[in-house]
Image (tube, rainbow, N blue to C red):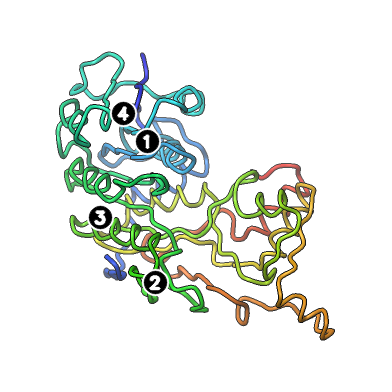
């Protein structure tokens, strides 16, 4: 059984608004409970879910997309197709997701090759192979960087959704104003006119919302080797405020939240993904350095002022600079909790055990 190639679809065998809409919370379904158990236990494709299976298209099989694929597959929730922009990482994807293969009978090509931009209008060949509105769920988690047609690609992805399940667009908490302090799903957003990055993301969110899609605004993503701490340790010394807050969420937790929204979320809603325990930059660097080796010193003006005044008292999330992300509402709506309640917790386990499980 062969896997797909080039800005295309990788078929998988049983795997992956500007303001918040707050639907009424409803009791958790048997499907959601089955997913939670399966995700933590790395269940087989014949996992515990007894609900009717739903197909899933993941646009962007990168670090997050692959984790969504693996968790969806592990919970036995239905067949999955993953779209990539090029074939550059296909061997790595196949190695990480060995269950890749053909399942969709509407794609007769034995290699499952579906080219898009290289052959003209976006989505033309996807429609020819799979037909529009062919997927129950769609997750769009491709990044906006280096993509001038980003919003158009989100719109094209919505055309592949048949509305039987959920469409989830993964955005960024960077769309919120910077100095808000406590920040929730419905907090004020940046002015698109003065912030091009926020403008692109908010326009993409709007495209998802217009068709009933949900938006998930994610805080800084990390693993042991990826994230803000990696940059800090590589740089060694940074001329900025070490007490400025960093809001984070582990990639695995972000993926489990995406799947929870697919099974329990509401159409058109806006959710936030974070661990709820922001840390200062210096604290992030210190935690990572203790676990992984290395160090970073922040020499921003505010830390210098504290040193000169003899005030060694560090700021806390209550009085520090930046946002303090809170997603209690999101957690209540979809019945989700992170495996890693804080970056400090994650690094502490690495320091003790040499790995985080």
Q: Nearer the viewer, mark 2 or mark 4?
A: 2
214 vs 194: above or below: above
Q: CA distance from mark 1 to mark 4?
A: 24 Å
Would residue 166 be visible to someone looking at this image? no
Q: Position of residue 47 (x, y in %)?
A: 41, 35
Dot placed on the residue nearer the N-terminal end, 1 or 2:
1
Dot placed on the residue nearer the N-terminal end, 3 or 4:
4
Residue holding disc 3: 208
183 vs 234: above or below: below
Depth check, front residue: 183 or 352:
183
Residue pictured at 35% horizontal, 30% vertical: 14
Depth check, front residue: 196 or 290:
196
Residue holding disc 4: 8
Residue holding disc 2: 190
Dot placed on the residue nearer the N-terminal end, 1 or 3:
1
Q: Nearer the viewer, mark 1 or mark 4?
A: 4
Q: CA distance from mark 3 to mark 4?
A: 21 Å
Dot placed on the residue nearer the N-terminal end, 2 or 4:
4
| Tags 3 and 2 touching, CB below 8 Å | no
Q: CA distance from mark 2 to mark 4?
A: 34 Å
- How many residues crowd mark 2 within 10 Å: few (<14), some (14–19), many (20+)? some
Residue pictured at 65% horizontal, 51% vertical: 231
Q: Position of residue 102 (x, y in %)?
A: 30, 21
- Badge 4 element: strand
Residue pictured at 56% horizontal, 64% vertical: 247
Q: Is residue 54 left or right of residue 194?
A: left
Residue holding disc 1: 76
Q: Quadrant of residue 232?
A: bottom right
């Amino acid at each position: 059984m062969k896997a797909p190639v080039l800005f295309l679809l990788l078929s998988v065998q049983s795997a992956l608004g500007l303001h918040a809409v707050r639907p009424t919370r409803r009791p958790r379904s048997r499907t959601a409970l089955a997913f939670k158990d399966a995700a933590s236990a790395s269940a087989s494709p014949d996992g515990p879910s007894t609900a009717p299976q739903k197909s899933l298209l993941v646009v962007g099989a990168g670090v997050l997309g692959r984790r969504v694929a693996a968790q969806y597959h592990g919970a036995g929730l239905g067949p999955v197709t993953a779209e990539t922009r090029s074939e550059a990482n296909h061997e790595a994807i196949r190695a990480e997701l060995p269950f890749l293969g053909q399942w969709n009978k509407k794609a007769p090509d034995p290699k499952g090759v579906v080219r898009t931009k290289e052959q003209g209008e976006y989505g033309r060949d996807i429609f020819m192979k799979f037909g529009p509105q062919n997927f129950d769920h769609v997750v769009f988690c491709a990044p906006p960087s280096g993509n001038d047609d980003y919003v158009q690609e989100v719109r094209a992805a919505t055309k592949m959704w048949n509305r039987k399940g959920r469409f989830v667009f993964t955005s960024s908490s960077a769309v919120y104003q910077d100095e808000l302090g406590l920040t929730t799903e419905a907090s004020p957003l940046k002015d698109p006119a003065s912030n091009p990055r926020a403008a692109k993301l908010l326009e993409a969110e709007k495209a998802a919302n217009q068709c009933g899609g949900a938006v998930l605004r994610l805080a800084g993503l990390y693993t042991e080797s990826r994230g803000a701490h990696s940059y800090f340790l590589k740089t060694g010394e940074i001329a900025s405020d070490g007490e400025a807050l960093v809001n984070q969420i582990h990639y695995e937790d972000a993926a489990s939240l995406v799947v929870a929204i697919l099974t329990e979320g509401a159409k058109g809603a806006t959710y936030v993904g974070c661990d709820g325990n922001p840390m200062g930059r210096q604290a992030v660097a210190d935690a990572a350095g203790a676990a992984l080796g290395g160090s970073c010193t922040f020499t921003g003006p505010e830390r210098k002022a504290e040193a000169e005044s003899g005030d060694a008292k560090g700021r806390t999330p209550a009085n520090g600079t930046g946002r303090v992300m809170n997603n209690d509402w999101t957690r209540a709506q979809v019945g989700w909790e992170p495996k890693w309640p804080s970056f400090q917790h994650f690094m502490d386990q690495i320091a003790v055990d040499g790995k985080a499980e």
